[in-house]
Amino acid sequence: MKYLLGLALLASSVASAANLSIYPYDGAKFVPGQRFDLRIEAENVQELKDAAVTLDGRPVEGLVRTTSKPTSAEWTLRSQSLPTGLHELKVRYTDANGEVTKTARWYVVPAVAPRAKNVILFIGDGLGWNTVNAARLVAHPYNPANGNATGQLAMMSGLSGMATVTTSSYDSAMADSANTASSIATGQKIQVNALNVYPDNTADSLDNPRVETITALVKRSMGKSVGIVSSAFGVDATPAAFASYTRRRGDYQAIADQYFKGDVQPDVLLIGGSRDFIPSTAPGSRRKDATDWITDSQKQGYTFVSSRTELNAAGGNKLFGLFNIDNIPSYLDRAQYQTPEALGDFKDMPYLWDSTKKAVETLEKNPNGFFLMVEAGMVDKYEHPLDWQRAIWDVLELDKAVEWAKTYAKSHPDTLVLVTADHAHSLSVYGTYDAAKGPGKREAVGVYEAAGFPTYGDKRDANGLPLPETSRTYAVGFAAVPDYCETYLGRRVFLDPTVSNGQTGAAAGFLPNPKLCQEGAVTRTGNLPPSANQGVHTADPLPLFAFGPGSENFFGMMDQTDLFFSMARALGLDATRTR
Amino acid sequence: MNRRTFVRLLGAVPVLLWAPGAGARSGVPLLKFSELYGRVTVRGAEYSDKLKGLQGQKVQMSGYMAPPLKPRLDFFVLTKQPMSTCPFCTTAADWPADIVLVIMPRGRELEPTTRGLQITGRLDIGVKKDEDTGFVSLVRLYADGVTTSG
């Protein structure tokens, strides 16, 4: 017996010398008919002899064999799909080292009867539980007479479903926006920096094995319209995850092209970041070719708009809006500060609620229904550089868009509204701050009952949102930080928390931004590596708020990949049918 | 690859300041970062009238050196504010819109610095791609003097 075990171990170690990978990975789940690319990669192969691939016991036909390097063999079969049930793919090959086998098991969930015709999915980028809570505390101050809340955010009141969502990547416990948004879009675990593809062993980031997104699925199999709205630049990870496929989220030009040539081709696309859609000859373009999607999109039947006024006046069934050459500035910059530094010549940009409303009004013309993803992209963009005020006020802007969607869903009871996030940041509200004693005085931070209640809401802007400047603010900080100067207060003109230390090689790192330190600040020693210039994403859980039909599919603790399957259940998605 | 690893080699080139004549000379027009572009729309940026009027002339600008691309700083990017990121170190870098490429004369190089810089040099505008790096610039200064300004 000992002898046999020894042999088995030997065989196993020989097998591990060769490295066999199968995508979709073992344990992957799909909806019926969801398309995926099958990819098998054998590395460290010596003198490959024979190979066999079977699915549920039958040989797989049509595999294309390649050899990307002398010691590898790959087999690819694109655009496959499976019916409901458990499936097993077995790979066996023999080379000079002996036989190697590997099995991947996949489960295709059963289709159910539809409950919802439309889905409006809001994604707050970086909207962890604590970030939502901070926005609630700012928007709805406590009654100082009795400590009761004076209200709730629209996203957290009148719920018909709620869940806490956990995140992880295929290759990391920590998440980035690309793989987390892709998990929501496809139901798969995805690598960091990848959009809706599995890994592969080639350098080309656009040839990786793909898995079909919910937006492509509802379009192909149910004939629904698709809309994508984001306040970030439009080829950024979250909007890109609903219409493109690449191993590298920085493939901006290819992502821009996939919006108009890919398998989704959203009917409504309202975004920032025009620089990826204008020809390279236009100063400010990030493209490397002469493609002009502003002109070409109109040939494809899109109405093009570039301001809030044009957006609100637009008709048509297909809408393409670019509202800034880069990100659409934060709510505070657009609605309150309005500095030339932040706005430049872009003085008429839509609010997220404008874009949400127009997107729905455009998409609802399709009698088959629609799927709309709305991203509040600037929440994350300002959590990274520790500017919690700009981040939180963008949550308040998102909340007004959610409020509009909830009202719409009340008069359209076939619409499911979801609010969730892609990942969290390490933001926490830990005290109050007496602005009269600041800026930057640690003694001005109050804790427990000595702190008193903050006074947000004593002054409000034209949209009814509180101004950040008030006598007693919240003290808000981040757990994961570089060395930086904390002033506790916001500022009208954004400043990065750190600057380069001017060193190179191993000594390269970042220093607190001296301009912030000069404002009067507490210097905080960071806990991230010296190479970090800003805050990072966390593994903290996320909220999910659900309203309307199909909400019952969202409850308790959910993995992010479950969101895809719960949306599919709500819609009764069965992609074995094609319209 | 992190290009900053190369830059360490620059310790062998102890030239930070290089100012033939007095550096910032009187009579040389000052150009501010805020004066580079007239309008920026979703269709791209438009050069300002002042910038177009100064094309080919010697001008003076103040700014900061962005974390460098090459081990030998025969060119660098001048920015309005000190930058915390190394845009060259990531793919598809997110540059601010208003940056100026500074090209040193042949044989002249600089060490990286975080101090403010004053540059005098000949202004050149228009889309130009550096064939070695693929870097696309819109505004360039062919420097003939660099001094620290603070």
Image (cartoon, rainbow, N blue to C red):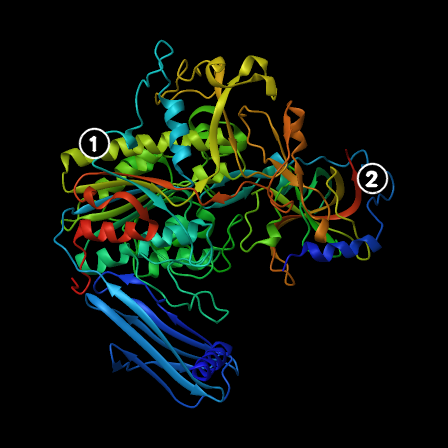
Classed neighbour count for the residue bearing mark 2: other residues with Cα under 10 Å, few (<14), some (14–19), many (≥20): some
Q: Which residue sits furthest front?
A: A1
Point out the frontmost of discs 2 and 1: 1
Label 1 SS: helix
Picture layout, residue A407 above or below residue A436: below
How packed mark 1 is, by other alpha carbons closer than 10 Å (few <14, some 14-19, many 20 or more), is few
User: Whole-percent x and y of residue A250?
Assistant: 49, 55
Work out whether A497 lies above or below A62: above
Q: Is residue B76 visible?
A: yes
- Number of numbered discs on residues: 2
Location of the N terminus of chain A by quadrant is bottom left
Residue A131: % across, % down: 42, 33
Residue designated by label 2: B23
* Residue at image coords 77%, 37%: B28
Q: Are marks 2 and 1 on the same chain?
A: no
Q: Residue furthest right?
A: B21
Label ID, residue A527: none
In the figure, is residue A560 to the left or right of A452?
Answer: left
**Extreme-top residue of the structure:** A145
Q: Is residue A469 visible?
A: no
Nearer to us in this view, A73 or A391:
A73
Q: Residue at x 24, y 76 (%)?
A: A56
Which residue is more in the foreground, B89 or A128? A128
Give the amino acid type for the residue marked by disc 1 in the picture. Answer: Thr
Q: Is residue B22 left or right of residue A511?
A: right
Q: Position of residue B6 (x, y in %)?
A: 72, 58
Up/down of A40 relative to B50, above or below: below
Q: Secondary structure at mark 2?
A: loop
Q: Locate residue A284, reporting x and y percent.
A: 53, 48
Picture quarter containing residue A500?
top right
Q: Chain of mark 1?
A: A
Q: Which residue is mark 1?
A: A407
